[in-house]
Image: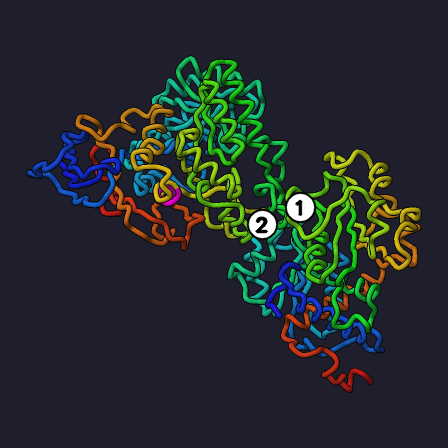
Amino acid sequence: MMRHLISAADLTRDDAVLILDTAEEMARVADRPIKKLPALRGRTICNLFFEDSTRTRISFEAAEKRLSADVINFAAKGSSVSKGESLKDTAQTLEAMGVDAVVIRHGASGAPYRLATSGWIDAPVINAGDGTHQHPTQALLDAFTMRRRLVGRDAGLGKDLKGKRITLVGDVLHSRVARSNVDLLHTLGAEVTLVAPPTLVPVGVDTWPCDVSYDLDRVLPESDAVMMLRVQRERMNAAFFPTEREYSRRYGLDGERMAKMPEHAIVMHPGPMVRGMEITAEVADSERCTVIEQVANGVHTRMAVLYLLLGGNEPAVTHTRPNDSESK
Amino acid sequence: MSKTLIRGAKVLGGEAQDVLIDGETILEVGTGIEAGDATVVEAEGKILLPGLVDLHTHLREPGREDSETVLTGTRAAASGGYTAVFAMANTFPVADTAGVVEQVYRLGQEGGYADVQPIGAVTVGLEGKKLAELGAMHESAAGVTVFSDDGKCVDDAVIMRRALEYVKAFGGVVAQHAQEPRLTEGAQMNEGVVSAELGLGGWPAVAEESIIARDVLLAEHVGSRVHICHLSTAGSVEIVRWAKSRGIDVTAEVTPHHLLLTDEMVRTYNPVYKVNPPLRTERDVMALREALADGTIDIVATDHAPHPHEDKDCEWAAAAMGMVGLETALSVVQQTMVETGLLTWAAVADRMSVKPAEIGQATGHGRPVSAGEPANLTLLDPAYRGVVDPAGFASRSGNTPYEGRELPGRVTHTWLRGRATLVDGKLA
């Protein structure tokens, strides 16, 4: 296992499958009356968030606490950062306080990579989303959700997503979720298609290991999973598309479009959803939509990542006897 | 002033000759010249060039003396073999008045390491709205002939047209930083394969090329000459080549870093590679080398842009743009142009001394190495191989993209009007 988790592209197939399998073990912990493992007792993890993100931060925090780690939450707002302190100084300050790992969310692409490679600190760095670059734990939780739904909870153990057809729809240009998913899904053997208006696909996409289409209706019947990406309304001010209505008509997912998908196919969304924009309420609230499962799976997956990065070389649960005092 | 005999140097890379300097002038060039009471510099195997001239230097003074001063910048210049540098106008305050350009000019003279020729801003405060007093700067003691809003593009077509026309009255030239501002909002690196992967805001080649196309047409229309700063794309080369074939009076420069580095370096997210214009692709690098070789691009200019350590020791988006270049320029040109067989040393002298002096009208620089000429000279050892270590730089800043990289060649001596400013690689 690697030391840091910066990009989904850094994961080998075996790394990724190990994380997904470990996440399944972690999921079993969530079914117990006491949802806690002693694995990271005495370790301190800092959630260093330079960008507002309640849901990702809470998900990491839940994962850390279930592994019995001590958690420090650092939000840049109102901190020394807003007074002009550099990333380097902030990180070194935290490390001096004995932090064993840093989970970082930053608005600048590459900030976690800099933190991990510049010699500023020694602690492992986990990327919780950087600019428009990567969000590897999101890709992992998405892959976990797909494997469960499309391969099976038990049947999926040890397996990847070979041959599964995954469609990502929306603002690819500004999406770290899209970049991470394309990398990881490709590693796991899936066939990925991106669907977006041409303005929201980056120049240079032709080297990515995926197909690109501008026509959602044509791709839907051949998709095992359709992931809708959030589209910010402000994008239309920069002429990426004319109006919200036109975007919804051409690239939004409604009940009628969902009906074109194969029976077994699922609808995914990394959240937060913009209902009425990229997804209608009918679809969002349907049985086929996994958005709530994805949230739950996020905790399992992040537990697996933290466990494996912070020293767990052996399977997390199988060989770990539940602490008696805790399980009673 | 005493005499100096440079013995056995390959003048412009040609036959070994002796060059005798007397005072500020070259007294004699030949073979077997008697040393007499002259100081002798043994130069066997070394190359003697006219002192290098940089048309594009940021000396940062006044305003950002934490990154460079006129003194430290000209010491870096001497160290890199330069005898004249043109100081860009984006200082604080901006060099848009006679007062500021005279101050910079005077500081250069007091330092004595290289002639400093200030460049005047085209528009007041580099804001692109209102012409600065170009005539007043020309008539000042600094005698400004080159005008540029470098760092910013004169993007308003009417302002650019007027500037091109106005400076004709006193033989000036406008040096354009070609960057269409709307196409580069939030731009962080070259737009292409790498930016798509890294999620960094793209800086399309067309943002540079569209301005160059517009400006050569404007220059043709009003019958002015225009100079294009730091050309960085294959498309820009094609446009300049076309303009020259039409007889348009355009000159262009390329930086050493655009001759060597590509946007692949940005994968490290190390802001030492963050620069404006951005590093481009391998294809662009090859087109730039070819264009410098065939004369489409006239000169090499460093765009020496010092920044304090803290402005680079951070995440990419927060970092300043620019690289220092004066002390590594000749080595990079040796590696990319001479050792590849694209340029002879005589052609290097043309691209790095003769032509830039001509474009900027730097009197006494870029002259032939012959009797009666001012003794502005650079001696380099092309056989030297060394690893770049910014700790040894004379510049106040160390933001070099070449740290730890082996580069060929080393300037050992520089003479400014007969005075040795660099001796055996050490500032004098």
Q: Is residue A325 magenta?
A: no
- The percent coordinates of residue A208 (x first, y second) are 66, 50
Q: Quadrant of residue B305?
A: top left
| Badge 2: chain ID | A
- The percent coordinates of residue B207 (x first, y second) are 59, 32
| Marks 1 and 2 share the same chain | yes
- Asked whether residue B1 is in view, the answer is no
Q: Is residue B200 left or right of residue A270?
A: left
Q: Amino acid at mark 1?
A: Val
Q: Using the image, determine if residue B288 lies above or below residue B358.
A: below
Q: Amino acid at mark 2?
A: Gly
Quarter of the rendering occupied by the N terminus of chain A: bottom right
Question: What residue do we see at 79% from left, 56% from top?
Answer: A165
Q: Quadrant of residue B349?
A: top left
| Badge 1: chain ID | A
Question: What residue do we see at 51% from left, 42% from top?
Answer: B275
Residue bearing mark 1:
A205
Q: How is the image coloured?
A: rainbow
- The percent coordinates of residue A64 (x first, y second) are 71, 69
Question: What residue do we see at 43% from left, 25% from top?
Answer: B251
Identify the element where label 1 is drawn. Answer: helix
Which mark is first along the chain, 2 or 1?
2
Q: Quadrant of residue B143?
A: top left
The dot on residue A55 is: none
- Asked whether residue B208 is in view, the answer is yes
Magenta stretch, residue numbers:
B331-336
Identify the element where label 2 is drawn. Answer: loop
- Per the model, the C-alpha gap separating discs 1 and 2 is 36 Å
Q: Is residue B151 left or right of residue B380?
A: right
Residue bearing mark 2:
A84
